[in-house]
Amino acid sequence: MLLPWAILLGIAARHPLGVVAALHRGSFLDRAAGTVAVLGIAMPSFCSASCDLRLQRELGWLPSGRMGGPAHYVLRSSRSCVPGGRFMRITRSAMLEVMESEFVKLARIKGLSETVVIWKHCLRNALIRC
């Protein structure tokens, strides 16, 4: 079972990444984000767990206890790869679909800035479709 912290981190980190990938469609940034998402989805959970154990025990970089400061959340947040990759791909496809709709074209014709069009009009409607 995924921890709520991992799910929240997956949502918080991957939705903006999906928006950026949709804005730069076909570029290196889009392909890199897509690769990270696919690898996050395809990576088995035991693989991320073995990486966590290596950072924890062999290198001594991360604490091994359950509760504590921010360093303790690194192990839990690494579990966000799977839902984060899915969130990024869904957000990207929803943003691409919304960016081609008529009301977005009308907002651009009306003279709204691109930032307002993307973050207010496009993202709000794309998150409904997620």
Image (tube, rainbow, N blue to C red):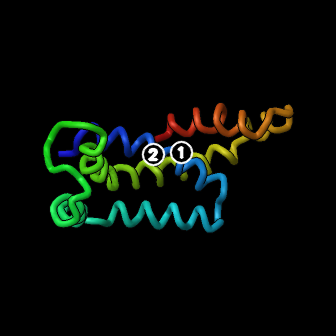
> In the displayed structure, does residue 98 sit left or right of residue 36?
right
Q: Which residue is mark 1?
A: 16
Q: Tell me what residue is drawn at x 53 percent, y 50 percent.
A: 18
Q: Tell me what residue is drawn at x 47 percent, y 51 percent.
A: 88
- Residue 42 drawn at (x, y percent): 32, 66
Say what amino acid the circle numbered 1 marks: Pro
Q: Tell me what residue is drawn at x 27 percent, y 52 percent.
A: 79
Whether 10 is drawn above or below 34: the answer is above
- Residue 86 drawn at (x, y percent): 40, 53
Q: Which residue extends farthest front? A: 60
- Pointer 1 with pointer 2, Cβ within 8 A: yes
- Residue 23 drawn at (x, y percent): 66, 52
Q: Which residue is mark 2?
A: 13
Q: CA distance from mark 1 to mark 2?
A: 6 Å
Whether 68 is drawn above or below 80: the answer is above
Judge by depth and name the residue closer to the eye, 6 or 34.
6
Whether 24 is drawn above or below 13: the answer is below
> In the displayed structure, does residue 29 sit left or right of residue 73?
right
Label 2's element? helix
Question: In the rendered image, which quarter contains the N terminus?
Answer: top left
Judge by depth and name the residue closer to the eye, 125 or 70.
70
Q: Tell me what residue is drawn at x 24 percent, y 64 percent.
A: 51
Which image quadrant for residue 43?
A: bottom left
Whether 101 is drawn above or below 56: the answer is above
Question: Callout 2: 10 Å neighbours few (<14), some, many (20+)?
Answer: some
> In the displayed structure, does residue 104 sit left or right of residue 36?
right
Say what amino acid the circle numbered 2 marks: Ala
Q: Specify the label residue 67 is tagged with.
A: none
Label 1's element? helix
Question: Callout 1: 10 Å neighbours few (<14), some, many (20+)?
Answer: some
Judge by depth and name the residue closer to the eye, 107 or 77.
77
